[in-house]
Each structure stands twice: as structure tokens, then as C-alpha cells.
């Protein structure tokens, strides 16, 4: 019999439940971004010349750098989860801290890109390509920001001694979310920056 | 899940290096003019990268069929909304 | 309250209702309390939405716009539709009755994520507060918010978009919670094929909620972006496509009608066997048909757009696929009827509403194919035929199922019995009022009366007067039913644990259940439909 409502007696059930819960949440995210990808496809097929011309205005080197930044941040998450599962809380905190730093770098680069566009008089309303660009990367950027918050909270849990080799669920679950954020960018980058 | 062994860390680094390599490849290919094939190659490489992230970083490799179901079912619905909408917008 | 104190307090027979004070409700993690809060909230919105309907029917008493301006009339039907759909019919059974009974049905103490459950209610509350806030410049677009008008309207569309986004998030959290709960928290021995059919219905519903709702969230995000940032996805003058809005909107809004109907069908599957004293006929068929309806429901959204200018191929595909959704639906209807056949039927109020569901849903469902066929759709689209179709399925179906559930589970939730005589009187008024109100709409619809107009041609006058009279009878019936609920809450006779002699697990808990649902988690050895055998 469980103690208070809100707890589950069996930690294995609790972990599997959490995992299914996060994958279900990621399913909603697939559809969320998916609708925007659909809009992208509809308009790319409708205005191929305009998309080709406009996409050249994006800096694919900066985009590639951001891709590397996110991939590295995902690696940091994997190493962090591995660390806490071996009971190494400080190493875990360092890895997740590195993830947050890399995420901040990502957002800084995006900020630079956005302001450069505004400086050249290019806004979301300028044309459909940039409407899609700003909406897709904007929604993605919000997810990066929220992810930074979640990862910070998990680091806080560790600083309070609440994580260990036998209880690493918050780390693994937030890690799953972070990899998904990386995954979305893996598609965004070629679709927006590379395909002519 | 193998934790506590160096294996999982080695795998993670190997996947990371593969991801970097694929990123470099896709950027380089984008400088070539292959017409329609640019899109195909770019999306193919992206899908390989995504699969690596999903299989290894997100631990799908070794998960139950139930978790695989949760991961793949939304992709089906994504294809559905895409194809359904395009069946209209592309053929008007 | 700590465990020992709570158990002692609950010995007064009030179970999960023992603890008092607003904090015990606002911060509760108990799925039963959260379900009860949803029930109260959605019922209030049902009544408010109903008032708007009565105002519409008042205006439609005369062919000219006599009482309200056209604009005001447009606001009324927009608010009627939006409130009924987003604030009542989508959350009522899933987040209300579902929250209360899913853990009890599967032999669990609570849902998988109780804190997320509480969050879903407060996100819902934030959503409806924002929606109410948007009433400073109320919507007149119809609940479908089609572009380009919604992008240009002077109404508070951006605010409303945020409100609906929040409501959608609440829906997603509920669906997510239920999916994991049903997978992971079933009691020992509760295999998938021993689950009550209400659970199968709720599982299918939750899948739809999780997959479809994000798309409508993005739809409203893009609508807000159009107004605030000037993006042009749906604006032809910027190269956009207003029909794209419809694709996104209906990709959610068609499956969502199955979010509305599947839980109600689940309730009917629970009630019919109990009051026929017969096992449900075709358990597996009913269970899998829920999943089939959910799946097929995703394939047909274009049938709302046949006259919007889609490509001929899209029209043909969506029309063809739409006919298929009738198949699993019919499977359910045949199985319910086969359950009734040679049963020992009694007509307590839950059964009256369940039988009403079957009858009215058949009528509503049979009018679907007329709309699915391209040729007839051109004639019937945006007429009162459509209005009648969806009121027969959504009100004759879902709402009757909801009422059946409320009457069936009232003793369990409250520990009191309802006055059966008054319940049956209310039912009779509702049944008569409903049919008089809505059947006439099929007739004027076929004869060409368009929907969403305050004025109409004189040749439709008689039927509209009849319909309005029907709506008054319907309103009285609903008020009598609500009065009966309130009386029951205050003065109803104490309810035994199992007044209907039903076999599903919730009836093994007390009436009302204790906070922890069961003293001991039951070990399940049989399916819950063994009626008519010596034991039941």
C-alpha cells in the first residue's frame, strides 16, 4: 500500500511510467513541429524559386556551428546520465552544466542571426520563407530555453543530494527531452539552411 | 542498459564522431549543385543522424516494443498530415 | 492530512470528501477530487453554452432579425459552439468521469502522475479565464475561426487563441496521464481483456488527444502570429493559403469528435449489461472497434472541406475514407443490441439515457453518409442538416452518454441516491425536447436553410417555431435534472456500495470511496461482465 497519494510503491514501475510519460510527451512534440514542417513543405513546393533565393540569405556556416553545438550538448547529456548512474553526482552536474552552457551558445548564435536579419530589414512578415524560418526556429528556440530551465532544475536536485545511482530518473527523463530538441534541429538545419 | 562499463561511454563518443562527420558531409554536399538530389541527400543524412540520436542517445536500441510503438506511431501521423494536405495543395 | 488521521476522519462515511477547506481541493492530488472539480466546471459551461443556444432559438422564432443585430447573433453562435466544444464536451467525460473512475476501474490508487493531473486542471482554469477575458471583444467567426476573417476580425482573436492553446495543453496532459496509467497501473490479474470497456474507450480517446491536439495548438499559434507578427501562411495576398488553416484545424477537429463520442460509448458499454443482467456481447469487437474508430477518425478530416476548393483527388479520397468510419461504429451498435436481446431489462435512469444514446446516435450516424457523399454534400454543406447531424451525434450521443454516466455513478461519487421519479421525468422532457428541437433542422436543412444566419426565408418559419418550442422543453428538462442532482447531493438517501449490483471494480470500493480507493489492491480473476450467471 502506498503512503501518500502521488507516490508509487514500486520504483521500477515508477521509472517505466516516467519513461512512457516522456515518450508520450515527445509524441505531442512530433505533431507540434510536424504541423509547421507541413506548412514548410506546402510552401516550398508552391514557391521553389522564392525559397531557393531566400534561403541563400541564411548563413549556413553559423547553422552548421549551431548543429555541432547541439550535438555536443547531447553528448554532454549522455555522459552526464552515465555519470549519475555510476553515483558520480559532481561529474553529472558538470556535464549537465556544460549542456546548459552550450545551449546558451546556441541561443546567442540564433540571437546574432535574428538581429542581423532585422538589421537588413528582414522580418517574419517579409515573405513566406522567412515566416517559416522565424516560426520554426523561434518555436525550437523556446524549447531550448525551456530545456535549459529543466536541466537547471535537475542539477539543483543533484546539489540537494536527491539523485544517486539508484535514482537517476529526472536526469534520464530530462535527457530524453534534450535529445529530442537536438533531433528537431537535425532536420531544421538542412531544411532551412542547406536545401536550395 | 550497460552502465558502469566504459562501453556505453565509448559508444556515445563513437556516435558523436559519426554525427560530426555526417554534419560535415551534409554541409559539403550542399555546396554542390545536384538539383533535386540535394534535398534527397540532405534529408537522408538528417534521417541517419536522427536515427543515431534516437537509437543510441535516447536508448531506443534495447527498449521494449511498447516504447518503440510510442516512438514510431507519431511519425506515422506526421506522414499522414503531410500527405493528406499535399494531396490537396499540390493538385489544385 | 496524515494517513492515520485521514482514515479516522473518513470513518464518518464521507470517504474522499471528508477533508474540508478550499486548500484541500485546490491542492489535492486525489484523482477523484480533480475529476469532481472538472465535472462541476464543465457543467457550469454546459449551462452557459445552453443559455446562448436559447438566445439563438429565441432570435430564430421570426424570419427577420428582431431581437439582436446580425453581429450579436454571430457572437452568440460562436460562443455557443466554442464553449460547448472546448469548455464542456471535450473535457467533461474524459477529465471528469475518466479521472474519477479510471483508477477505480483498473484497481489502482491513483493515476500515474497525480501532480500532472492537478496541473492539468489549473491549466484548464487558466485557459477558460483567458477565454472569458477575450469576451471584451467577443468572437463572431463561428467556432471554426476560419481565415481570412479570423485574421482580420476586430475581435480579441489573439487572446482567444492563447486560451484555446491552454485548454489544449490541459487535454494533452490528461490524455498522457491516462495512457501511462492504463499501461502501467493495472491491478494484478487485470489483463487487457479483463478491462472494463470504458477503459478501452478512454485509452483510444487519450491517443487521439495526444496526437491531434498539438496540431490545433500550432494552428492557433499561427493565427496569433498572423495577427501579431504579420506572417502570411493563411493570407492569399502574401502567398498564403486560407485552406491550409482548414487542413490544420480539421486535422484536430475531426478526430476530436471521437474524443467526444468514445468515452460516452464506453459508458453505454458499462450500463447496458448491468441493466440487462447479461454479459456484454462481443467484448473484443467493442474493445478493438474503439481503436479502429480512433485510427480511421484521423483519415477523414477533409470531409469538412469539400466545398472549400480542394483538389478533386483530395475530395475523392476523403469522401471514400469517410464511409469506413461507420463500420466500427456499427459494430458497437450491433453488439449493444445483441446484449439487450433476451436480457432482463429494467429502466432505471442510467439505462434510459444509455438506450436514448443508442437510438439518437443511430439517427445522427445515419445522416453522416449523406454528408460524406460528394454530390449530396454540395447541397447540404453549411445548412441546418449539418447542424442537426452533429447535434444528434454530439448531444443525442455524447451528452446522453454523459447523463447516463452521471446517473449511474452518482451514488458512487456522492454516497447518495437520486430521486428516480424526478430523474425519469427530467429524462422524458429532455428526450421529447431534444427531438422536437433538432429533427426539424434536418427538414429545413434539406430544403436549403443555411446555418449561422439570424434571418431566413419565410418558408422555414413553421419548423423554426417548432424547434424553438422544443428547445424550451429541453431546457426545462435539463433544469429539472440539475435540480435533482442538487437535491440528491443534499438530501439523497445514503447509497450502498453497489446499488446496481454491478461487477466492475469501482463498486467494490465504498460509496463514496476512501481516498486510497481500496483497502487492499484487488487481485483480478475474471472479466467484469459475468451478469446472469449464478454469482451476479
Image (cartoon, coloured by chain):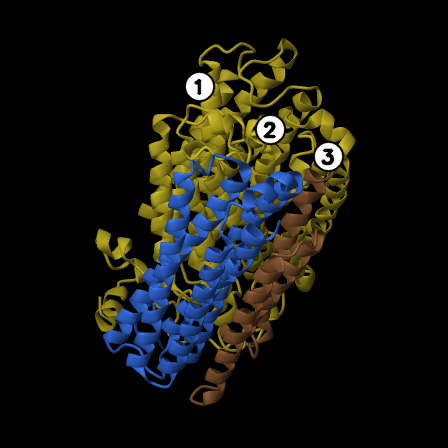
Whether C284 is drawn above or below C134: the answer is: below
Q: Looking at the rendering, which quadrant does residue C192 occupy?
A: bottom right
Observer able to see residue C394: yes
Tell me, what hue is chain B?
A: brown
Q: Are marks 2 and 3 in contact (CB under 8 Å)?
A: no
Q: Label 2 marks which chain's residue?
A: C
Tell me, what hue is chain A?
A: blue
Q: Are marks 3 and 1 on the same chain?
A: no
C361 left or right, relative to C53: right
Label 2 and label 3: CA atoms lie apart by 37 Å
Give the labeled residue for mark 2: C438
Q: Are marks 3 and 1 in contact (CB under 8 Å)?
A: no
Towards the viewer: C284 or C351: C284
Towards the viewer: A65 or C453: A65
Q: Which residue is most to the front?
A: B32
Q: Secondary structure at mark 1?
A: helix
Q: Label 1 marks which chain's residue?
A: C
Q: Secondary structure at mark 3?
A: loop
C384 left or right, relative to C375: left
Residue visible at 33% across and 68% down? A5
Tell me, what hue is chain C?
A: yellow
Q: Secondary structure at mark 2?
A: helix
C247 left or right, relative to A133: right
Residue visible at 66% across and 21% down? C444
Towards the viewer: C352 or A45: A45
Q: Position of residue C88 (x, y in %)?
A: 45, 41
Give the labeled residue for mark 1: C72
Q: Earlier in the sequence, mark 2 or mark 1?
A: 1
Label 2 and label 1: CA atoms lie apart by 23 Å
Give the labeled residue for mark 3: B92
Observer able to see residue C512: no
Amino acid at each position: 500500500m502506498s503512503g501518500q497519494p502521488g507516490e508509487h510503491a514500486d520504483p521500477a514501475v515508477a521509472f517505466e511510467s516516467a519513461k512512457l510519460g516522456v515518450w508520450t510527451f515527445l509524441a505531442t512534440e512530433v505533431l507540434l513541429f510536424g504541423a509547421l514542417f507541413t506548412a514548410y513543405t506546402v510552401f516550398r513546393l508552391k514557391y521553389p524559386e522564392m525559397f531557393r533565393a531566400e534561403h541563400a540569405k541564411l548563413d549556413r556556416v553559423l547553422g552548421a556551428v549551431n548543429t555541432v553545438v547541439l550535438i555536443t550538448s547531447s553528448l554532454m547529456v549522455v555522459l552526464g546520465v552515465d555519470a549519475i548512474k555510476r553515483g558520480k553526482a559532481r561529474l553529472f552536474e558538470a556535464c549537465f552544466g556544460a549542456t546548459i552552457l552550450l545551449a546558451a551558445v546556441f541561443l546567442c548564435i540564433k540571437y546574432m542571426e535574428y538581429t542581423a536579419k532585422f538589421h537588413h530589414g528582414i522580418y517574419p512578415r517579409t515573405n513566406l520563407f522567412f515566416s517559416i524560418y522565424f516560426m520554426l526556429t523561434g518555436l525550437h528556440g523556446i524549447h531550448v530555453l525551456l530545456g535549459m530551465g529543466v536541466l537547471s532544475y535537475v542539477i539543483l536536485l543533484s546539489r540537494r543530494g536527491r539523485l544517486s545511482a539508484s535514482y537517476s530518473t529526472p536526469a534520464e527523463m530530462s535527457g530524453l527531452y534534450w535529445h529530442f530538441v537536438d533531433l528537431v534541429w537535425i532536420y531544421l538545419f538542412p531544411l532551412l539552411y542547406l536545401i536550395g | 542498459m550497460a552502465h558502469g562499463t566504459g562501453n556505453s561511454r565509448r559508444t556515445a563518443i563513437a556516435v558523436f564522431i559519426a554525427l560530426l562527420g555526417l554534419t560535415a558531409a551534409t554541409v559539403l554536399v550542399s555546396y554542390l549543385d545536384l538539383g533535386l538530389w540535394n534535398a534527397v541527400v540532405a534529408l537522408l543524412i538528417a534521417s541517419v543522424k536522427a536515427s543515431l540520436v534516437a537509437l543510441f542517445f535516447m536508448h531506443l536500441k534495447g527498449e521494449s516494443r511498447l516504447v518503440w510503438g510510442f516512438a514510431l506511431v507519431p511519425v506515422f501521423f506526421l506522414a499522414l498530415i503531410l500527405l493528406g494536405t499535399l494531396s490537396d495543395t499540390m493538385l489544385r | 492530512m496524515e494517513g492515520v488521521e485521514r482514515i479516522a476522519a473518513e470513518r464518518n462515511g464521507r470517504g474522499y470528501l471528508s477533508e474540508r477547506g478550499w486548500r484541500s481541493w485546490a491542492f489535492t492530488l486525489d484523482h477523484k477530487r480533480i475529476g469532481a472539480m472538472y465535472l462541476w466546471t464543465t457543467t457550469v459551461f454546459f449551462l452557459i453554452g445552453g443559455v446562448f443556444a436559447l438566445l439563438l432559438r429565441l432570435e430564430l422564432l421570426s424570419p427577420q432579425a428582431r431581437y439582436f443585430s446580425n453581429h450579436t447573433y454571430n457572437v452568440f453562435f460562436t460562443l455557443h459552439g466554442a464553449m460547448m466544444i472546448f469548455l464542456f464536451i471535450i473535457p467533461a467525460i474524459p477529465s471528469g468521469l475518466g479521472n474519477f473512475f479510471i483508477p477505480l476501474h483498473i484497481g489502482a490508487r491513483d493515476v500515474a502522475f497525480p501532480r500532472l493531473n492537478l496541473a492539468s486542471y489549473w491549466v484548464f482554469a487558466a485557459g477558460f479565464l483567458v477565454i472569458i477575458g477575450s469576451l471584451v471583444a467577443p468572437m463572431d467567426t463561428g467556432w471554426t475561426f476560419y481565415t481570412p476573417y479570423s485574421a482580420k476580425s476586430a475581435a480579441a482573436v489573439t487572446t482567444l487563441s492563447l486560451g484555446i492553446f491552454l485548454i489544449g495543453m490541459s487535454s494533452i496532459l490528461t490524455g498522457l496521464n491516462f495512457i501511462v496509467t492504463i499501461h502501467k497501473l493495472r491491478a494484478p490479474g487485470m489483463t487487457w481483456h479483463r478491462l472494463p470497456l470504458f477503459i478501452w474507450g478512454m485509452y483510444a480517446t487519450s491517443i487521439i488527444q495526444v496526437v491531434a491536439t498539438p496540431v490545433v495548438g500550432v494552428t492557433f499559434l499561427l493565427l496569433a502570429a498572423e495577427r501579431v507578427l504579420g506572417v502570411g501562411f493563411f493570407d492569399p495576398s502574401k502567398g498564403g493559403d486560407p485552406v491550409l488553416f482548414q487542413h490544420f484545424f480539421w486535422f484536430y477537429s475531426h478526430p476530436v469528435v471521437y474524443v467526444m463520442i468514445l468515452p460516452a460509448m464506453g459508458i453505454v458499454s458499462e450500463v447496458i449489461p448491468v441493466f440487462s443482467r447479461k454479459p456484454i456481447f462481443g467484448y473484443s469487437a467493442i474493445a478493438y472497434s474503439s481503436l479502429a474508430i480512433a485510427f480511421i477518425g484521423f483519415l477523414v478530416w477533409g470531409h469538412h472541406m469539400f466545398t472549400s476548393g480542394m483538389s478533386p483527388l483530395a475530395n475523392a479520397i476523403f469522401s471514400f475514407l469517410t464511409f469506413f468510419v461507420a463500420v466500427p461504429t456499427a459494430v458497437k451498435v450491433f453488439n449493444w443490441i445483441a446484449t439487450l436481446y433476451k436480457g432482463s431489462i429494467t429502466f432505471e435512469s442510467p439505462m434510459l439515457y444509455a438506450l436514448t444514446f443508442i437510438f439518437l446516435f443511430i439517427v445522427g450516424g445515419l445522416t453522416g453518409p449523406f454528408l460524406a457523399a460528394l454530390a449530396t454534400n454540395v447541397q447540404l454543406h453549411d445548412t441546418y442538416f449539418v447542424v442537426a447531424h452533429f447535434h444528434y451525434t454530439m448531444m443525442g450521443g455524447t451528452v446522453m452518454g454523459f447523463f447516463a454516466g452521471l446517473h449511474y455513478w452518482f451514488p458512487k461519487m456522492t454516497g447518495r441516491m437520486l430521486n428516480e421519479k424526478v430523474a425519469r421525468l427530467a429524462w422524458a422532457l429532455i428526450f421529447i425536447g431534444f427531438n422536437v428541437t433538432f429533427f426539424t433542422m434536418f427538414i429545413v436543412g434539406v430544403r436549403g436553410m443555411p446555418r449561422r444566419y439570424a434571418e431566413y426565408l419565410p418558408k422555414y418559419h413553421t419548423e423554426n417555431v417548432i424547434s424553438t418550442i422544443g428547445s424550451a422543453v429541453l431546457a426545462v428538462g435539463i433544469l429539472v435534472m440539475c435540480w435533482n442532482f442538487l437535491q440528491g447531493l443534499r438530501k439523497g438517501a445514503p447509497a450502498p456500495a453497489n446499488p446496481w449490483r454491478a461487477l466492475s471494480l469501482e463498486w467494490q470500493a465504498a460509496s463514496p470511496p476512501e481516498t486510497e480507493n481500496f483497502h487492499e489492491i484487488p487481485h483480478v480473476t475474471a472479466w467484469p461482465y459475468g451478469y446472469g450467471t449464478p454469482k451476479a
